[in-house]
Amino acid sequence: MGRKRCVGGDGSKMAAGCCGVKKQKLSSSPPSGSAGPGGGGGGSSHCGGAAAAGGEPGALPPPSIVRLNGLGGLAGGAAGCALSPPLPPSCGGGPGGLSPPAASLLASPGAGSGGPGCRKMVVSAEMCCFCFDVLYCHLYGYQPPRSPRFTNDPYPLFVTWKIGRDKRLRGCIGTFSAMNLHSGLREYTLTSALKDSRFPPMTRDELPRLFCSVSLLTNFEDVCDYLDWEVGVHGIRIEFINEKGSKRTATYLPEVAKEQGWDHIQTIDSLLRKGGYKAPITNEFRKTIKLTRYRSEKMTMSYTEYLAHRQHHHFQNGIGHPLPPYNHYS
């Protein structure tokens, strides 16, 4: 982008996360409500990806966990548990109801590389299926699903749950420490669904309305200029010293600024507020920010697509009866 870049920024130990789902008004004064500072020591964060020496009310995640901010407050109260699990799809027929884009992704895990000449993406629809399997088995008391077929290479990762037609945030926690994908997705599937302190633990009744997104983070770069990143392309993680002299961090995934309709300054200022900075934001202060940019590979799947994929998988392999999810990867 024509600006000088600094050296470093592998991002292996960064821990702060944020993803937005609703428009937020920005101003030079701190937002009202619960959007103040959060997060405890050791790199954890809450509601906006703030990380600092101070603590926060309520339970905190382990040090490497990151909570992603929904910007839209809590979802509605959770429904009660169902008396019996919804039946998996019966076999016979192809993946009925699966949208063509999702069908093509499911037919070729890891596809969606963006066109000829682009490298093949690591993230795949199978990863979203695996997350649904893990959650399904937990909620219904089945044995955990077996190891999946996709790569077990280590990546920083996030698991995001949204719910309903308006896709309200339902939970989002991840880590900037690279984890092997099989164990990392198992862990953060349940952590984001059950232990995001902004939301009640997820229930069985919510399953049919869920959307699961898996984000794998790559290409970490420290930059000297806080404007040296591209909206819609880069995620950003900022580090700054607040008015009390404490070091704070906050991050937004690559899609956030574009979804919110923010420019560079609005995004930076939103991160500062979410990171707990309460003083007026000046251009001189923005220049003191340490910024790391990164990219992500993201895949999203609805529960309906998940069920269709399972049905298609059973049909292709000649299975004549529905199986619980933990046999899905046998």
Image: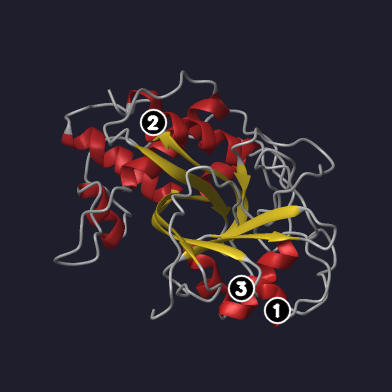
Q: Secondary structure at mark 2?
A: helix
Coordinates of residue 141 in the picture (x, y in percent): 54, 21
Residue 162 position within the rendered picture, expressed as x and y whole percent measured from the top left: 56, 54
In-front residue for pair 118/77:
118
Residue found 77% across the figure and 50% down from its top: 38
What's the amino acid at mark 1?
Glu
Residue drawn at x 77%, y 35% is 59
Q: Does label 3 or label 1 sit earlier along the sequence? A: 3
Report the side of 107 relative to 6 (left or right).
left
The relative height of residue 62 versus residue 269 in the rendered view (above or below) is above
Q: Which mark is residue 182?
A: 2
Q: Quadrant of the N terminus?
A: bottom left
Q: Residue at (22%, 46%) from the top-left corner?
A: 94
Does the CB distance between marks 3 and 1 fall below 8 Å?
Answer: no
The image's mark for residue 79 is none
Q: Is residue 47 visible?
A: yes
* Disc number for residue 267: 3
Query: In this image, 317 relative to 198: left or right?
Result: left
Q: Amino acid at mark 2?
A: His
Determine whether 19 is above or below 79 in the image.
below
- First-in-chain label (2 vs 1): 2
State the residue position of label 1: 284
Instruction: Give amino acid for label 3.
Output: Thr
In front of the other: label 3 or label 1?
1
Tell which tag, 2 or 1, sits nearer the viewer: 1
Marks 2 and 1, how far apart in space?
A: 44 Å
